[in-house]
Image (cartoon, helix red, strand yellow):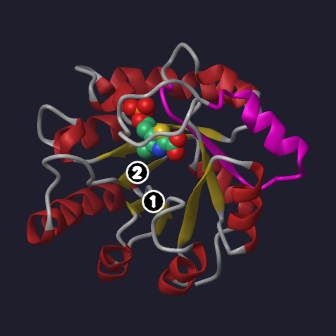
Amino acid sequence: MARWNEEEIRRVLSLYFIAGSVNVTRPLDNVLHEVINGGATIFQFREKGEGALKTDQKEQLARRLQKLCRGVGIPFIVNDDVELAVKLNADGLHVGQDDAATEQARQAIGDGLLGVSAHTVNEAKEAVQAGADYLGVGPMYPTTSKDDAESVRGPEFIRTLREAGILVPIVGIGGINISNANDVIKAGADGVSVISALAAEDEPQSVAEQFLKQIKAQS
Ligand code: 3NM
């Protein structure tokens, strides 16, 4: 299998749903199912934070969610856990700056989709050089979903990255909801990554539909 092509990556990043069992108040399987029905284009399993599942339970949940993604043909990405990504033959892996080094991650997953979180121009440049296929850039707005989130960068930071010659696919992250998603796309992002605006919703399908409508209107 060859590395992902850039056009395909930009397309799948449009509505990037991220979640783990701690982000939902009902089974994540159900929430993911509804978000997929609403049109999510990619899913990242991010089992982190207090009360997160470990070992076998984590793997079992991951396998169920992967199956849901496979059923509709959207990429299933594992956050941080290189071993799990390899074991499950996930479509890709997303790492932060403190997680597995980008080069090691690339080696481990071969041609899989590799995303890296970047918060500065330098981090972004280094990640691309080390083999990142796309960058997760944030936080766009204040977020309560990540304990160690950096200071808010705002959508203008995506503009800064584009002006600095960073042209790889970018997805904005952090505090994104249907009221501010447009500004993130306008600043130069290919898509938006969302945890709480979908995971904490009673009707995530309808919210996902609204996100997608806005994103499509701009592309
Ligand atoms: N990474 P919500 S912000 C997982 O800035 C994550 O790199 C961030 O959750 C970064 O959509 C964030 O609920 C949390 O704000 C995103």
Q: Position of residue 69 (x, y in %)?
A: 34, 56
* 88 relative to 120, above or below: below
The image quadrant of residue 145 is top left
Give the structural element (helix, strand or loop) at label 2. Answer: strand
Point out the tag, 2 or 1, that comes first from the N-terminus: 2
Q: Which residues are magenta?
A: 153-176
Q: Position of residue 211 (x, y in %)?
A: 51, 25
Residue at 28 percent across and 22 percent down: it is: 201
Three-letter code for the amino acid on which mark 1 is drawn: Pro
Quarter that holds the C terminus: top right
Nearer to me, 145 or 18: 145
Nearer to me, 203 or 189: 189
Residue at 61 percent across and 39 percent down: it is: 191
Determine if the magenta segment contains residue 125: no
Determine if the magenta segment contains residue 160: yes
- How many neighbours does mark 1 have within 10 angstroms: few (below 14), some (14-19), or many (20 or more)? many
Q: Is residue 16 left or right of residue 205?
A: right
Q: How many marks?
A: 2
Q: Tell me the CA gap for discs 2 and 1.
A: 6 Å
Residue at 42 percent across and 61 percent down: it is: 77
Q: Regarding ligand 1, which quadrant of the image does it lie in?
A: top left
Three-letter code for the amino acid on which mark 2 is drawn: Phe
Q: Position of residue 200 (x, y in %)?
A: 27, 26
Q: Which mark is residue 208?
A: none
Asked if the residue at label 1 sits under 8 Å from ligand 1, the reply is no
Specify whether residue 39 is in view.
Answer: no
Q: Which mark is residue 43?
A: 2
Q: Which mark is residue 75?
A: 1
Give the structural element (helix, strand or loop) at label 1. Answer: loop
